[in-house]
Image: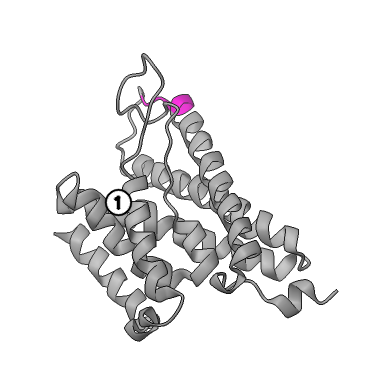
Amino acid sequence: MIWLGLSIAIFLGALYFSPPQIFTKHPLSFLAIVSILFLAIAWNVSPTLPGQAPGKFYGLIFHFYGASLLTAMFGPAIALTILFPVAFLGVYVIQGGYVEASQHYLMVCVLPTFFAYLTIQAIQKYIPKHLFVLILGNGYVAAFMSVILSGSFLLLVRMLLGDAASSFDFEGWLLGLIIIAFMEGSLSGMLLAIFLIFRPNWVSTYNEEAYMSR
């Protein structure tokens, strides 16, 4: 129950900082629903290579979490609000188990959102404003770092709790983390670039005056 309670507390806190009425306004009135359905499906797509053991973490798989992209588009509060129903629709409804859904929300939503937000803030503060930097930084780098830092944090916690046995495959874990990070970064960067070209009003971190004044 502690996992569920913590997840609900974070969701309610995110909802508090992004009032519900904001989801009735364009473009969030439809983007939130589309994002929830798309990510719930994406979370359950994991094709593997022939001969690969199913469920192996470090196998070459397709996976898209979307936490970093939502953070770059709408900010962390709205991102966490949208990702809560994603976790319970994609994990609890499809796979079953509220504990697993809660853990997914905390580990692949809350942590990546937090690290993506920190990365985006650092980029905006220390890197000169340029459209290429916005796409590469807020899209690719933020997503890549959100996966790497979240995975490293979870491994550190596991080691501190004494769960990482001597037989733990660090090489396989690191390889899988890098593969997922590159995939997450590539998809986030590509989608953010598309949105900036065709729907720049969907990206809250984009300021036309700051990035296009020259």
The residue carrying mark 1 is 104
The quarter of the picture where the N terminus appears is: bottom left
Determine the image quadrant of residue 111.
Answer: bottom left
Determine the image quadrant of residue 67.
Answer: bottom left
The quarter of the picture where the C terminus appears is: bottom right
The residue type indicated by label 1 comes to His
* Magenta stretch encompasses residue 169: yes
Left or right relative to 203: residue 86: left
Residue name at image x 38 percent, y 25 percent = 48
Overall secondary structure of the magenta stretch?
Answer: helix
Residue 152 screen position, x and y as percent: 47, 44
Residue 42 screen position, x and y as percent: 37, 46
Magenta range: 168-172
Foreground: 213 or 149? Answer: 213
Q: How is the image coloured?
A: one colour
Residue name at image x 26 percent, y 51 percent = 90
Residue 103 screen position, x and y as percent: 27, 52
Q: Residue furthest front?
A: 198
Question: How many circles with numbers are drawn on the protein?
Answer: 1
Check disc 1 and report its element: helix, strand or loop. helix
Left or right relative to 22: residue 174: right
Residue 83 screen position, x and y as percent: 35, 62
Residue name at image x 37 percent, y 54 percent = 38
Q: Residue furthest top?
A: 51
